[in-house]
Image: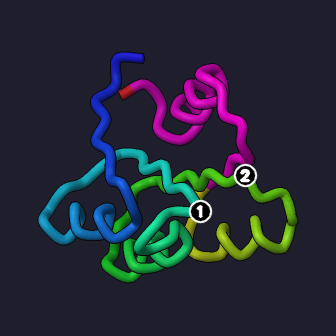
Amino acid sequence: MGREVEVASNGHQAVNLHQKGASYNLIFMDMDMPVMDGTQATRELRAMGVKSMIAGVTSRKLNSEVRAFMSAGLNYCFVKPLTNENIALLIAKLIGNI
């Protein structure tokens, strides 16, 4: 899709990237990750003042779980499975053509 991507294996790594000065236009945050889950990582990023768009990704379908994830500071939440088309539409919707 012509985008530059950086991958963090868990929420702790994602937070560390920002602590080291990295910044991103869009962050995909999986709800269920080892070490630090996506909900906690999103809360920490927002507490650090990160203003980037954060799109949550989860396989959980319970509205209460999705709402709890959203309340951590997400801009949008996808329920898996994701497709290339869904990802492209989300990028266009959230950050436009960068």
Q: Position of residue 87 (x, y in %)?
A: 58, 30
1 over 26 or under it: above or below: above
In the image: residue 82, left or right of residue 6? right
**The quadrant where residue 41 appears:** bottom left
Sequence-wise, the earlier of marks 1 and 2 is 1
**The quadrant where residue 35 appears:** bottom left
Q: Residues within 10 Å of mark 1 (few under 14, many from 20)?
A: many
In the image: residue 79, left or right of residue 94? right
The magenta stretch spans residue 80:
yes
54 over 81 or under it: above or below: below
What residue is shown with label 2?
59
Q: Secondary structure at mark 1?
A: loop
Q: Secondary structure at mark 2?
A: loop
Q: Residue furthest top?
A: 1
72 over 92 or under it: above or below: below
Query: What colour scheme has been applied to the protein in the rendered image?
Result: rainbow
Q: Residues within 10 Å of mark 2 (few under 14, many from 20)?
A: some
Q: Residue furthest front?
A: 34
Marks 1/2 in contact by CB < 8 Å: the verdict is yes
Give the magenta range. Answer: 76-97
Q: Residue at x 28, y 41 (%)?
A: 6
Near-viewer residue (75 or 27): 27
Q: Position of residue 49 (x, y in %)?
A: 33, 75
What residue is shown with label 1?
31
Q: Amino acid at mark 1?
A: Met
The magenta stretch spans residue 57:
no
